[in-house]
Every structure is written in C-alpha cells, then in structure tokens.
Amino acid sequence: MSNLLTDRQFWVNYWESKTGLSVSIPENYLFHQQLGDLIRQQNVKNAIELGGFPGYYAVFLRKYFQLDVTLLDYFVHQPVTNALLEANQLKASDIHVIETDLFKYVPEKQYDLVLSCGLIEHFNDTADIINRHIAFVKPGGSLFITLPNFKALNGWFQKTFDRENYDKHNIDCMDPKLLQQICEQAGLKVLQSRYFGRFSIWFENEQQKPLGVRLLKKSSWLAGKLLTRVFPFDSQALSPYIILEARKPL
C-alpha cells in the first residue's frame, strides 16, 4: 500500500477550488496560546512549517513572534503565498520557501521548532511521517503537530456526507496514545498528546452541500457549542483536534 493518501494533483485541485486565501491572520489564531507558550519557554528563534501551503502558520509565527521561518510543501503557488504575506504586512523575503517532496528531501538544517497542522493524517505510515518531522528538529528543539479528530462527531459528518474527503485521511493515526508512543520510541520527551478543543464541525466546500445537510450541520454545531459551553472539557467524542508537543533531547 502506498504511504500517500493524496497526490500532487489532489492538492492542486484542492487549492484551486479555494477562494479568499489571502487573509489577515489574527493574533488569537488557532493554537496561538500553545505555540506562544512553547516559543517563550524554549526561546525559539527559528521554525519550519511542513506541508503548510499557503503558509498560515509560517505567517503567524513571523508576524507575531518575529521568528526566522521556513515553509516546506510539495505544492507551493508562490503568488498565493505572496498575497498572503502582503495581507499581513510582510514581504516575500520574510519567509523562506522550499517546494519539494518531503520523502526525497534531506534536511539541510535543523530548527528550534518543527510544526505541521493537518499533514500527518494524509499518510498511511504514521511513524514514518512523524520521523521525517523529527529529522528537522535540532537537539533541544520542539516538535508541534496538530491534526483533525475524525473519531469525534465531526468525523461522522465527514464520513456520512463527504466520504471522498474522509477517505483522504488516515483515521487510525488520530490517537493521542499512538502519537505519544511513536515519539517516545524515537527518543523524544512528550509534553502533551491529547484531544484539543471543545467542539466544531466543518465541511470542505460547504456551500456545495444539499440544504438539508447544511441545516443538520448548523443545528448540530449550535447544540454542540451550547453543550461544551455548559460542560467545558476536551474529549475523543467531541473535540475537533488532536495536539502533540514533544522535545528532542540535547
């Protein structure tokens, strides 16, 4: 079985279907608190975002923490990234861009922080893709990975109403204990590997869904938000994300 659940054409089609990509990244961007704490505590100076086109987290780290940032992805359409940078009052030179196949690329340097958000779940061999992340982490550096939790209610919506998108994801990797085990076997110290977030549901290209599906999604979203406001806790059943933070020993 191929390790890839997607190919380059999938991502070309995916990004070409998107509009409004050049947005101003807010200071309270998703995972801002976790990243901010990590950067301050570890005195992070440089970072690389893997599989992050068009570069939202690279822009976030440059804009609010002035890190020396690199974006690496299999598919990079530079005009889109440049427009994103401009929308955030940054220059093209503020982010280093590497367009390459992660499975063929040998890291030329290592970084204080290596992160990916929504990457590892597109591969069958979870240990392999995580170890490719670890190769970029310098001794004493940090690994920060997030991915969706399709074992939650959100995953039921994806599986039921968007099976094509659901099948592009490795559901088995959406397991905090598995992710922790892989990192520990690689010699890293795991600081957190857990479900994250109160509740959320989303669709790709939602406006293309039938009206009844959109209404069901909206009513479920409202009910879930109300429930988790009254009973705020992270859980496999409701949390939309998984977060992993680990450190490579010196």
Image: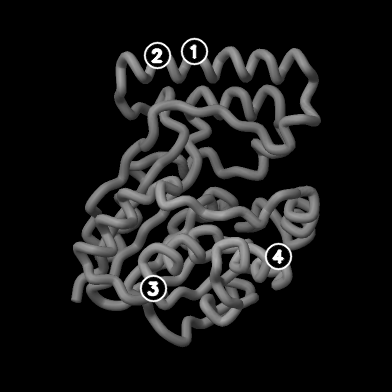
Q: Circle 4 is placed at which residue position?
A: 80
Label 1 Cα crowd, 10 Å radius (few <14 / some 14-19 / many 20+):
few
The answer for how far apart the CA atoms under marks 4 and 2 are is: 38 Å
Q: Circle 3 is placed at which residue position?
A: 67
Q: Circle 1 is placed at which residue position?
A: 223
**Identity of the amino acid at label 3?**
Leu
**Identity of the amino acid at label 1?**
Ala
Mark 2 / mark 3, whichever is N-terminal: 3
The answer for how far apart the CA atoms under marks 1 and 2 are is: 6 Å
**Identity of the amino acid at label 2?**
Leu
Residue at 34% from the left image edge and 62% from the top image edge = 143
| Residue 155 point in image, percent of width and height | 56, 29
Helix, strand or loop status at disc 3: loop
Asked if disc 1 and disc 2 are in contact, CB closer than 8 Å, the reply is yes
Work out whether 6 lies above or below 149. Answer: below
Mark 1 / mark 3, whichever is N-terminal: 3
Asked if disc 4 and disc 3 are in contact, CB closer than 8 Å, the reply is no
The answer for how far apart the CA atoms under marks 4 and 3 are is: 21 Å
Asked if disc 2 and disc 3 are in contact, CB closer than 8 Å, the reply is no
Q: Circle 2 is placed at which residue position?
A: 227
Which of the pair 5/2 is nearer the observer?
5
Point out the image quarter for the N terminus: bottom right
Asked if disc 4 and disc 1 are in contact, CB closer than 8 Å, the reply is no
Which of the pair 196/226 is nearer the observer?
226
The answer for how far apart the CA atoms under marks 4 and 1 are is: 36 Å
Helix, strand or loop status at disc 2: helix
- Image colouring: one colour
Residue at 39% from the left image edge and 34% from the top image edge = 197
